[in-house]
C-alpha cells in the first residue's frame, strides 16, 4: 500500500480528525493544507522555502504538466520529485478539473475528452487511462482519478449522468494504474449539491476500495453554507479508515469549517494567487499591502507571524517592491500566505488534540474579524 | 574616514592590484564585482542568496530610489540597509547616469538638472547638493558625486565643457556631504575617449582628495579596445592609495581586462538582465537556456559551477520554468550569473596573489571560447 492513513483521535467538540498520512516520501500530519505547484514549481518560491514554512506536501497539476513540458520529459528526468527538486510527498490532480475550466473546444464522450491546449491550440486527449498513465510517469505519491467536474449551478439530470460517468471512469483508472505499490490513487466523489447523488457517488467509489477519497465539485461558485451542507451530508458516508480530501478549498474559514466536518486534506491556489496581487492573510484579517496607507508602515505584514517575510521585512518595503514590479515582493507575500495557512492547520491539529476545535474556531473567527461569517476570500 | 583602501600586492605579470576595502558594513576583497539592486532589491533574489553566492557589496540606484519610494521614506525606515535587510556594504550611484539615460525632458544648467520622472512624468530636480542629500538619507557606505555622463560619440568641445562642469559639481558634492565619517564620497572621472580630458578630470578630482575615484562614461557604446585604451591612459594617473571603480562594466572579459589595468571595483546590470532573458554565463561560454536544444538536457547550467542553481536543477527544468513564465526560473539564472562573476573575481584575486593574472586571462579566454577577443556580451 503506497499510502496509509493513521487516525490518532477525533475531536470531542467536533467531527474533526487528527491523523497521519504515511507516504513513500514521508509522513503528513492531518488535517493539512497543500500548497499548489501548478507547473512543477510553487509560484515564486523554492523547495527550501516550502520546507522552511513547514509544508509537508504539495500539489501539482497533471493537465499543465501534460501540456508543458510533457510527462515523458518528466519521466526521463527521473520523475516529478527529481525534476523539481522536491523530496517530500506530491499529490497530482487528474486534469479533470482543468479540462473543464481551462481547455478550449472540449468534447466529452464515454471514452474520454478531446480538447484544445490553452497554450497553443494543439488538439489533445485525456481519458481515465491517459490521465492515469501521465500520473504514473510523474511519479506522484498520491494520484487522482480522472473525473468530470459539473459546473454550479447545473441541472439535476446532467449532474446525475456526469456523476455516474465519473464512477465508471474511476473504475477504469484503477484498472489502468500501473504502480499501485508506489503511488496511491484516490477516487473523487462528485454529485454536485445533491445529497442523493453524493451518496450514490460515495457508494460507487467505496465499492472499488480506493486508498483515499476526495470531494470534488465544491468551491465552484456556490455559497459557503451550501458547501458545508454538502460536507455534512457526504463526509459521514465516507470510510473512517481512509483520508478525506476536499479539493480546491483554501480560505482560512473554510479550512477550519472543513476540518470540523472531518476533512483531512485541502489544496487551493488562493494563498499564492492573492499574494501575487499584493493581498495577504493575517491574524487580524485580510490586508491589501499594495494600498497607499501602508507606504510608510514599518510593521511586518502580521506582527504575530514568524515567517521569513515577517521576520525581516516591513509592509512599506513589500509595498514598494510590489509597486515597483519586483519579483522579490511576490516571493515575500507568497511565503507569508502559505505560512499563514500551514500554521493555521498546525493550530487546528493542536486544537483537535486538546478537544477544543469549536472554541478555537470561535476565537479565530472573532480575532480575524469575520464579516457575515466569511473571511473575505 | 568611512572607507579605507588597503593594497595587499600588485601582480608581477600585470598592473592588477589585490586589496581590501574597509567600510562601515564590512570588508570587501578587491578586485570585486558588485551586483546591482536598482530598486532596493537585486531583481529576483534575496539578501541571503546574495550572501550564499559570496557577494560582499551591492550597488543601488539613487535616481530610482529618489523617484520611488523616495529617500525620505527610506530615511524613516532607518536607511537603505535596514529597509532592504542587507547588512553588508552598499554603494549608491549619484543618479547622474540615469538622468541622462532614463529621464525625459531634461534641462541641464550649471546649477543642476530638471527632468521628468520616467514613471509618471512628475517634474523633478537633481543637483550636486540634492544627489548628495539623497545619498546621505539612504546611508550607503559609498556615495558617488553627481556627474554628467556624455554620450558616445560626442564632440570634443561638448565633452570638455561637460567634464569641467562635472569637476565643479564634484566640489559642490564634497561641500554638501553631511556624513563624511559614515559615508565615503567618490569622485567620478569623466572625459569621454579623450586622453587630455581624462587627465584634466583626474587632476581636478585628485586635488579635491576624494577617498576613492571611479571612471565613468565608459561602456556607453564604444568598442572594448577603446575602453581599454582609456583605462591604460587614465588609471596610471590615479592615486595608488585609493580604490578605483570602473562604472557599468560587467562582461567576463572586461572584468579580467579591467583588473589587469588596475581597476578594483566593477558593477553592471548585465548578469541579472540577461538572466531574466534566459541567458547564462558558463565556463564554456554563453548559453541560452531558453533554446529548444536544452529541453531534455538534464545537465546543470554549468557542470563546473557550484552555485545553488547548478547544485540542484537541470537545464531542462530551468528552460521549462522560463518557457512557462515561472519566476523561480529567473531566480535560478540570476543566482547562477551573479555567482559566475563573483567566483570569477575570486579567481582573479587568486591569480594576482600568485602573480599569474596574464596566464589566467589566456586560459580563461581560451576555455570560454572567446570570439574576436570578445565574450559575446
Image: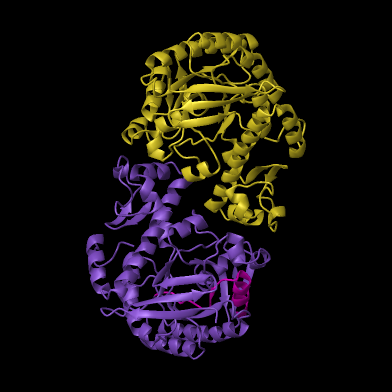
Chain colours: A purple, B yellow
Q: In the figure, residue B226 lies in which quadrant?
A: top right
User: In the rendered view, does B356 fall on the left or right side of A59?
Assistant: right
Q: Quadrant of the N terminus of chain B?
A: top left
Q: State the residue in front, B48 or B35.
A: B48
* B160 over A227 or under it: above or below: above
Counting from the top left corner in percent of width and height, residue A195 is at: 36, 86
Relative height, residue A102 to residue A170 (above, below): above
Q: Quadrant of the C terminus of chain B?
A: top right
Total numbered circles: 0
Q: Per the image, is A141 magenta?
A: yes
Q: Which region of the structure is painted magenta? A: A129-152
Tell me where residue B160 sits by quadrant.
top right
Left or right of A99 in this view: B319: right
Q: Position of residue A247 (x, y in %)?
A: 44, 73
Residue B297 percent location from the top left of the image? 70, 56
Can the viewer see residue B276 in this picture?
no
Instruction: Based on the picture, tell me whether residue B235 belongs to the magenta stretch.
Output: no
Q: Nearer the viewer, residue B93 or A275?
A: B93
- Seen from the viewer's position, the closer of residues B15 and B132 is B15
Q: Quadrant of residue B233?
A: top right
Whole-percent x, y for residue B339 in the image:
59, 41
Amino acid at each position: 500500500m503506497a499510502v496509509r492513513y493513521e487516525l490518532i483521535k477525533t475531536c470531542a467538540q467536533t467531527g474533526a480528525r487528527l491523523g497521519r498520512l504515511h507516504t513513500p516520501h514521508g509522513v503528513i500530519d492531518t488535517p493539512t493544507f497543500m500548497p499548489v505547484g501548478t507547473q512543477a514549481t510553487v509560484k515564486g518560491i523554492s523547495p527550501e522555502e516550502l520546507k522552511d514554512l513547514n509544508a509537508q506536501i504539495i500539489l501539482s497539476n497533471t493537465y499543465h504538466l501534460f501540456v508543458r513540458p510533457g510527462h515523458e520529459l518528466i519521466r526521463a528526468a527521473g520523475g516529478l520529485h527529481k525534476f523539481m527538486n522536491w523530496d517530500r510527498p506530491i499529490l497530482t490532480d487528474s486534469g479533470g478539473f482543468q479540462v473543464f475550466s481551462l481547455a478550449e473546444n472540449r468534447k466529452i464522450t464515454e471514452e474520454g475528452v478531446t480538447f484544445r491546449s490553452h497554450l497553443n491550440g494543439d488538439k489533445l486527449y485525456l481519458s481515465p487511462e491517459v490521465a492515469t498513465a501521465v500520473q504514473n510517469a510523474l511519479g506522484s505519491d498520491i494520484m487522482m482519478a480522472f473525473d468530470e467536474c459539473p459546473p454550479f449551478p447545473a441541472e439535476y439530470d446532467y449532474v446525475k449522468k456526469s456523476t455516474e460517468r465519473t464512477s465508471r471512469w474511476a473504475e477504469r483508472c484503477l484498472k489502468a494504474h500501473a504502480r499501485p505499490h508506489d503511488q496511491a490513487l484516490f477516487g473523487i466523489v462528485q454529485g454536485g449539491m445533491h445529497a442523493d447523488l453524493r451518496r450514490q457517488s460515495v457508494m460507487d467509489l467505496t465499492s472499488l476500495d480506493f486508498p483515499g477519497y476526495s470531494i470534488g465539485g465544491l468551491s465552484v461558485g456556490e455559497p459557503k453554507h451550501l458547501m458545508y451542507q454538502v460536507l455534512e451530508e457526504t463526509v459521514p458516508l465516507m470510510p473512517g479508515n481512509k483520508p478525506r480530501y476536499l479539493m480546491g478549498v483554501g480560505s482560512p474559514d473554510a479550512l477550519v469549517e472543513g476540518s470540523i466536518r472531518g476533512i483531512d486534506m485541502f489544496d487551493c491556489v488562493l494563498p499564492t494567487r492573492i499574494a501575487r496581487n499584493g493581498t495577504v492573510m493575517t491574524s487580524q484579517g485580510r490586508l491589501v499591502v499594495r494600498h497607499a496607507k501602508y507606504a510608510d508602515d514599518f510593521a511586518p505584514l502580521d506582527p504575530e507571524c514568524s515567517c521569513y517575510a515577517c521576520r525581516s521585512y516591513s509592509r512599506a518595503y513589500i509595498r514598494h517592491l510590489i509597486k515597483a514590479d519586483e519579483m522579490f515582493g511576490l516571493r515575500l507575500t507568497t511565503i507569508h500566505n502559505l505560512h499563514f495557512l500551514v500554521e493555521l492547520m498546525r493550530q487546528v491539529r493542536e486544537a483537535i488534540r486538546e478537544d477544543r476545535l469549536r472554541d478555537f474556531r470561535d476565537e479565530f473567527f472573532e480575532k480575524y474579524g469575520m464579516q457575515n461569517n466569511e473571511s473575505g476570500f
